[in-house]
Amino acid sequence: MSAAGLDGHGPEVLAEIAEVRETVARLHAELPRWELVVWTAGNVSQRLRTADLFVIKPSGVTYDELTPESMVVCDLDGNLVDGTRSPSSDTAAHAYVYRHMAHVGGVVHTHSTYATAWAARAEPVPCVLTMMADEFGGDIPVGPFALIGDDSIGQGIVETLSTSRSPAVLMRNHGPFTIGKDAKAAVKAAVMVEEVARTVHISRQLGEPTRISQEHVDSLYDRYQNVYGR
Ligand SMILES: O=C(CO)[C@@H](O)[C@H](O)COP(=O)(O)O
């Protein structure tokens, strides 16, 4: 593993890298805190504003060992630019999303239990909760089956989310990938997808949940995205 290094980047880029390393390290701690991952099975990244680079965790390091300094910097082809360890095994997927979705500033992958159970069934989570209309603007879609390590997962994420308002996709037989304007927004979507996947699963044990009409989904989505919390 050889890294190109950060020589040639100016102080503004170096300052942002230091800031994003802190942010991404801190946000990784949210994954076990919200019980979205076991061992090392999930990752968070954030794109820089000042350069075509992103910060992601190193592969195979447990969450309690992650520090800002251990975060790695990659270019948008997923090549290691700065860091002492190999980047996450999902780096190619994160990089593909950044290359093809200009509005995305953060990507998260987890194997959270209920969302992954829906992914194993290859079944979208139907929009039967106001919280789903708010955050996802409809059903949470399922992406295709894809092998880990090359562009396949990224292609599946981009294809699926390009035709949906949802910031979350359940990659078939794998688990949820979420996007956001930054890593914090993508972590929020990862927390939300697990919460609604769990609630809808429990609801199904009691009978068939009732869908929210498209008109009401649109109204709820508009209020939450444009009015809530402002
Ligand atoms: O989906 C998988 C493996 O099934 C991956 O998400 C890894 O579990 C995450 O590993 P690293 O980020 O530590 O490479």
Image: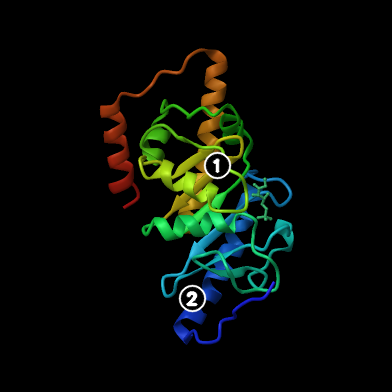
- Above or below, comparing residue 58 to residue 16 in the picture: above
Label drawn at residue 5: none
Total labels: the figure holds: 2
Q: Quadrant of the N terminus?
A: bottom right
Under mark 1, the amino acid is: Pro
Q: Is residue 215 visible?
A: yes
- Above or below, comparing residue 113 to residue 182 in the picture: above
Under mark 2, the amino acid is: Glu
Name the residue rendered at 73%, 60% in the picture. Answer: 61
Q: Which residue is mark 1?
A: 176
Name the residue rendered at 42%, 44% in the picture. Answer: 159
Towards the viewer: 138 or 51:
51
Q: For label 2, count other residues whose C-alpha is less than 10 Å away and answer few (under 14), some (14-19) or many (20+).
A: some
Closer to us: mark 1 or mark 2? 1
Name the residue rendered at 74%, 49% in the picture. Answer: 39
Residue 194: x, y in percent? 55, 37
Q: For label 1, count other residues whose C-alpha is less than 10 Å away and answer few (under 14), some (14-19) or many (20+).
A: many
Q: Which residue is mark 2?
A: 16
Towards the viewer: 230 or 60:
60
